[in-house]
Image: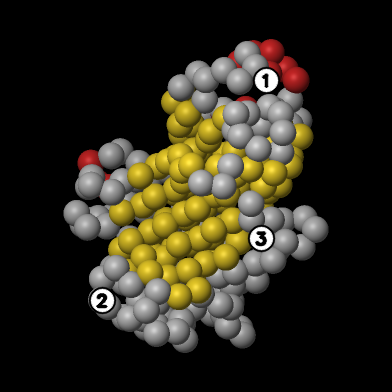
Amino acid sequence: MKNVVYIGALAWLAGTSSAGVIASTSFENAFVGDQYVDTGDASVDHDLVNNASQSVVDFTYDGSEMGFDAYYRNTRGSVGLTDGDWVGATDFTGTVGSFTDGVQGYQMSDADGTMGLAFDTVNYVGFWGVSVDLYVQATGWEADDSIRLWLEVDGGMTIDLLNTVGSDVNDLDIEGDWMSLDFDLSSYTTATLYVELESNSGSEAIYLDNVVFAVPAPGAIALLGFGGLVGARRRR
C-alpha cells in the first residue's frame, strides 16, 4: 500500500473494515474508457455529462457506491475540457503507483478552467465523519492553480478540508503521496462533499479514492473520545 499522510482528527475512518459505513465510493463500479471530450460550450459554466466509450465523469448510486456529478466553470476564458482531457474514472497508476482502495480512482487534470465534482448528499444523526484520499501530482504548479475540497453541511455552511486558493501548491508539501483528509460530522446531520481543480496543464492533476462517510468502530470511539478532535498527521 502507498504511504498515506493523515491530516485531521479522524484517522480511524481511513480503514473502515470495522467501522459502520454510511455511504462510500472507491470508483470501482465507474466505467473507465477513452479520453473525455466535453461537448458543451467552454465559454459558459455547465454540467458535464458522460459520453459513450469515454471514462465517466458522472455516476448514479448503484446500491453499492455513492453517486457523483461533475461540472465545469469558465474561470480562464479558455477551451476547458473540449480539447480532450484525462478526467473522470481511471485505472491509470503511472502517477500514483496504486490506489488506496481497489484498482480505480477518479482523476481531474488540465481543466483549462475549473472542473468540479459534487457527491451525493449524505444524511445521518449521531457520531460520524467523512474521509477522502487525495493524491496531488508533483509538478510545476502555477500561482493561479488551485485545489479545493470542502463540505456543505446542513444545507448551507461550508467547511474546507483543503483549500489552496491564494497559495502556491508547490509550497504546501502536499504533492507526490496519498493523503487522507477527514472531518468529524457529529455536529451536523447532512453533508455534501465537493472537489474542485483549477489548472491548465496535463501534469497538474489530482486523484481521488476511498471516499467514506462512516461511524467509527467502538474501540476508536473510546480511544478518541466522543466527538473529540486530535489534529494529528502521521504516516504508515
Which tag, 3 or 2, sits closer to the chain's start? 3
Density class for disc 1 (Cα within 10 Å; few <14, some 14-19, many ≥20) is some
Q: Secondary structure at mark 1?
A: helix
Q: Secondary structure at mark 2?
A: loop
Residue ID for mark 3: 67
Q: Nearer the viewer, residue 10 or 105?
A: 10
Q: Are discs 2 and 1 less than 8 Å apart at CB?
A: no
Q: Name the spot of residue 43 as percent of width and height, x first.
A: 33, 81
Q: Farthest residue in the right direction?
A: 63
Q: Quadrant of the N terminus?
A: top right
Q: Are discs 3 and 1 less than 8 Å apart at CB?
A: no
Answer above or below: position of 195 versus 226. Answer: below
Q: Farthest residue in the left direction?
A: 143
Which tag, 2 or 1, sits closer to the chain's start? 2
Q: Secondary structure at mark 3?
A: loop
Three-letter code, disc 1: Ala
Which tag, 3 or 1, sits closer to the chain's start? 3
| Callout in the foreground (3, 1) | 3
Task: Say which residue appears at 47% left-offset and 86% top-offset.
Answer: 39
Residue ID for mark 1: 220
Three-letter code, disc 3: Gly
Task: Say which residue appears at 44% left-offset and 26% top-offset.
Answer: 233
Q: Name the spot of residue 79 as percent of width and height, x first.
A: 31, 80
Density class for disc 3 (Cα within 10 Å; few <14, some 14-19, many ≥20) is many
Distance from Cα at disc 3 to Cα at disc 1? 28 Å
Q: Which mark is residue 165?
A: none
Density class for disc 2 (Cα within 10 Å; few <14, some 14-19, many ≥20) is few
Residue ID for mark 2: 77
Q: Are discs 3 and 2 less than 8 Å apart at CB?
A: no
Three-letter code, disc 2: Gly
Answer above or below: position of 217 versus 36. Answer: above
